[in-house]
Amino acid sequence: MSVSAHEGAKPARGLRIDFKTLGPLLALILLVILGYLLNPLFLGEGNITNILTRSAFIGIIAVGATFVITAGGIDLSVGSMAAFIAGVMIIVMNWAVGAMGASLWTVLFGIGCSLILGVGAGFINGFLTTKAKIEAFIVTLGTMGIYRSLVTYFADGGTLSLATGARDIYRPVYYDSFLRIPYPVWVFILVAIVGWVLMNRTAFGRYCMAIGSNEHVARYSAIKVDRVKTATYILQGLCVSLATIIYVPRLGSASAATGVLWELEAIAAVIIGGTMLKGGFGRVGGTVIGALILTAIGNILNLTEIISNYLNGAVQGVIIVAAVYLQRGSLRTGRKKAAE
Amino acid sequence: MSNAQGIAEQAVLSAHRISKSFGEIPVLFSIDFDIKPGEVHAIIGENGAGKSTLIKVLSGIEQPTSGTIHFDGKAVTLPPNGEAEAMGIVLIHQELNLAEHLTVSDSIFLGREIKKYGFLDLAEMRRRSAEVLDTLHVHVDPDARINTLSVADKQMVEIAKAISRDARVLIMDEPTAVLSVGETETLFEQIRRLTARGVAVIFISHKLDEIMDLADRVTVLRDGQLIATVSTEALTPDSIAQMMVGRELSNLYPPKHEPDVDAPVVLSVRGLQAPGVNEISFDLRRGEILGFAGLIGSGRTAVAEAVVGLTHKTAGEVSMNGKAADFSEVAKSVAAGLAYMTKDRKGRGLLLNMGLQPNLTLLTLKKHLKGGFLDQNSEAQALERAVRRFDIRARDASVRVGQLSGGNQQKLMLGKTMESEPDIIIMDEPTRGIDVGTKQQIYHIIAALAAEGKSIILISSEMQEVIGLSHRVLVMREGRLAGKLEGAEIVEAEIMRYAAGIKQGGDDERISA
């Protein structure tokens, strides 16, 4: 780079830890050490696999949420959407089992439905925010209520269960492994890699950041703002659909209680990972770490007696607030530099 | 340098040898100013002459770097943050400062609500608001929400608010810029009523006829210097315009190379209609710099945005090189070789929290794709080229654009625009708020682009700039073309006459409303 050395005073840089980049990773490492000290079982292979598998649902959804939030939006409907998709998948597969008997095709049919529903639901959110110009918070608050109530209605207030024949075929998707790593974790890894590449190595990711950073600048830079924003919601829907596909074989059922508060956990993972809630700056890698941190906290509380497991939410809450505080702290010093 | 009235013995507010610098940049040089009760005193000058800074100093929002302010004959330090209102000095901003969702009565009493037993006494506030509005003969319901009012009525509410605070000095920053002729007349009636009651009114305006109509005295500023304070009777609009001008062109501007006589028309606009744009037609030839002059808000930006497809035009035709070019979105105009560089570099042009590289390539990111993925090497090379070509100075490549000086931001934005390799470039206020050295660099770049055969539309509120660079000048006023100037006619006083509405357009006999 041949940028000449001029322009203002040089701020003191160097030794200072950049919380935005390294913070989440350091927090995760500390958490792992803490977990091990409290209970050596924490680092057992079984437990590690367990943490990874459980973090996969929130993690996959959170990767999608990273794009929505980076582009300046928000999607509150993901938890309800997951429950809704799970419910419809089960209904559809049960119908297929009744009509043609259980086979691999039944499951593929269900998976196909899930993908279509996810993309469709994402498109609806995107369309309403961009074309109908309703705030994303309101739109997704609305669709959140709609999906939640629809799944309750389909289940008639109870539980939708997958027919046994299909369940046996579908079960390995959650419980089996490849190279000793469970399939859900593979899906998570794949989604994370694709997400990272999309965010950091394609025009789409750059456009998301530009829009979240300043929508006017994006529009004046010939970016098709509405299209990109809609695409982030579709991507989010696709991620929800993938998470649901690996979630359904776990219990083989869906109810009004499925996916409750997932939206908040996903947003929390994104924020802990260093993405800014007001948009403009997205870190897919951070989001993955954020999801792992959230799951690890719950797991540590399960394995130890010091803090009641019932306080899981409280500990997560403290971590989220602390993460945001640290991010803002480092930003403030950045702004001071700019003012010089 | 004469203060016509001498040091007024009964001035309510006066400033003596006021200077003001922002950082190391001086904006006002030793200004004397005074206003007497019941007087209307206009401040006039080009953009950047220091008018706004002067009224900010007079209302306490900015503190002078040196000099004193006297209020009622006593030297005072005016309190900042609009607290001078309590002393009776009220500034009404150009972009009115009203909370859109409050009612008229809420707004009038905002910050000094009347209370009874600790609760708001709404009835009393409503009654008193109605009273104030009545004395002003303003027919606005005290319970109406601000956002349901017209701009003119909002202004009346601001005035009522000032009156209810017993304003003794009312300072108005371009109050008529957003008003129609009828509304302006009503405002002037109000001002006359106020002055009859002994209120002193200071106002900034660009419209010379209004100043002749309303003001008792006029203070002319130029480049932060006090040129004169004169009583209005001694003036004609022409003599004011002359005072505002009176500066020689230096070698700030490169020599003009006239485009070839037979240079083809590359952009042709016919009967363009859009919000804020009324029946605009013009041609742009290859290698030409076409200046768009006019006051702020006269519709020049609106023309540019409608042409490139940022806003939708309601009627009219645009053609490029003889082919229809009705762009529905910016991406299409950029692809066709027509680029618009916004005047709002911080709000519309650049992502301040990002680095130089993503900003430079944002408009043309598709050029840097390799197999669908971003090629960061190619982006880095583009930045290196732009840094060299436009002399962009940054500490290092990782610095955020918000930390660059205005001049470097402007050069980066120019680089970003030129990345799309346009044949026609519309530059909107390309030198706003940047130092004179960078201005000169940008002027030379603009001239060089034209000499290369690019065609340029230069929108600028700095008349010197329009005059120094343009081959032809169009003057806009209230959304219409007020005049066209060519060759030797391009002088500041002439542009000012068209822009201020003293003279109507040459080949177009329409008289604006």
Image (cartoon, coloured by chain):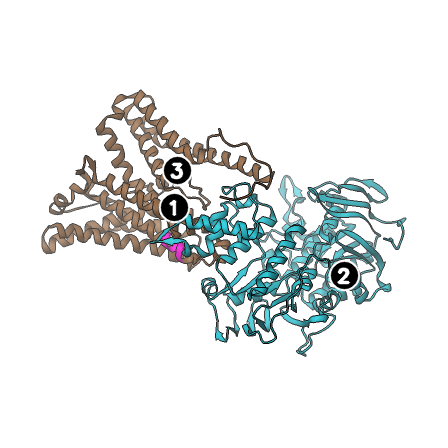
Chain colours: A brown, B cyan
- Residue located 58% across and 76% down the image: B262
Tell me whether the residue at label 2 lies in contact with that at label 3, contact meaning CB atoms closer than 8 angstroms: no
User: Which residue is under mark 3?
Assistant: A273
- Mark 1 vs mark 2, CA separation in Å: 53 Å
Stretch of the chain drawn in magenta: A227-232
B378 vs B281: above or below: above
Residue B224: percent from left, percent from top: 75, 51
Residue B121: percent from left, percent from top: 64, 46
Image quadrant where residue A45 sits: top left
Give me the disc on residue A200.
Answer: 1
Q: Nearer the viewer, mark 2 or mark 3?
A: 2
**Number of residues whose C-alpha sits closer than 10 Å to that of mark 1, classed few (under 14), some (14–19) or many (20 or more):** some
Q: Is residue A196 left or right of residue A212?
A: left
- Mark 1 vs mark 3, CA separation in Å: 15 Å
A98 vs B490: above or below: above
Relative to the observer, which residue lies in front, A36 or A152?
A: A36
**Number of residues whose C-alpha sits closer than 10 Å to that of mark 2, classed few (under 14), some (14–19) or many (20 or more):** some
A185 vs A310: above or below: below
What chain letter is assigned to the residue under label 1? A
Tell me whether the residue at label 1 lies in contact with that at label 3, contact meaning CB atoms closer than 8 angstroms: no
**Number of residues whose C-alpha sits closer than 10 Å to that of mark 3, classed few (under 14), some (14–19) or many (20 or more):** many
Labels 1 and 3 positioned on one and the same chain: yes
Q: Which residue type does callout 2 highlight?
A: Val
Q: Main secondary structure of the magenta part?
A: helix
User: Which residue is under mark 2?
Assistant: B245
Residue B256: percent from left, percent from top: 66, 65
Q: Is residue B395 left or right of residue A136?
A: right
